[in-house]
Amino acid sequence: MAVTTLERDLREIFGSRVQSLVLYGIHAPGAGHRSSGHGHGHEEPAPVHTLTVLDSVGHDDLRACTARLGSWHDAGLATPLLLAAEEFARSLDAFPFEFSGILADHTIVSGKNPFEGLRVEAADLRRACEVQARSHLLHLRQGYLETRGRSDALAVLVVRSADAWVSLLQNIVRLEGLAGLDRPRPGGTSSAPST
């Protein structure tokens, strides 16, 4: 219902400029039943994520969307991702994690398939994994210094770092899947990604 309402609202704002509306993430059919939290009970349901590809997006359009944002959030929707068609294909290499995740779990709600003929290149994902890993390492070193070696503070650092580690490992698994498509497998085995 929420996505249907969103589609109606977007068509009122953008008219025929709406090319595609895509549902992605854990709410996409076939994405499995994943929780947004860590199993501590009484968690808010994960918001429903959508991507809309448009002919164009202007200031007046965004202003019109802000007037409806509260009702979208109240209906359980995340703030929609709005992309002009001309910037969409050029964004894949800049946001390889995000778009590979969308490509992995999505459903076309209406319009044409915006992903047809597009894919995230393994080299872009590999580069992003390396940046993410190095950034995480630098922050961990800085965090370790700030704990001054106290075990209670180290425990807090480990807990606070868990989400970043999970994200990095998920992206490495995704990279391994993409890289496996591109590289030969001598002897029937695959080597680890070189990040």
Image: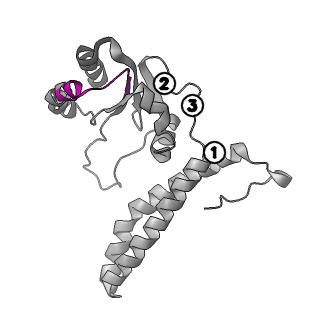
Q: Is residue 51 above or below residue 121?
A: above
Q: Which residue is mark 1?
A: 178
- At label 3, which amino acid type do we have? Leu
Say which residue appears at 45% left-offset and 22% top-offset.
108
- At label 1, which amino acid type do we have? Leu
Pinpoint residue 123: horizontal percent, then vertical percent: 61, 49
In the image, the segment drawn in magenta is 52-63
Q: Quadrant of the N terminus?
A: top left
Q: Is residue 134 above or below residue 119?
A: below
Say which residue appears at 30% left-offset and 56% top-offset.
40
CB contact under 8 Å: marks 2 and 1: no
Q: Earlier in the sequence, mark 2 or mark 1?
A: 2
Q: Nearer the viewer, residue 31 or 94?
A: 94
**Total tally of numbered discs in the picture:** 3
Pinpoint residue 67: horizontal percent, then vertical percent: 14, 28
Q: Which residue is mark 2?
A: 114
Q: Give the numbered dot on residue 118.
A: 3
Say which residue appears at 44% left-offset and 67% top-offset.
136
User: For residue 178: magenta?
Assistant: no
- Residues under labels 3 and 2: Cα distance? 8 Å
Pinpoint residue 96: horizontal percent, then vertical percent: 50, 45
Answer left or right for 119 relative to 142: right
From the viewer's perspective, is the residue at label 2 or at label 1 nearer? 2
Q: Quadrant of the C terminus?
A: bottom right
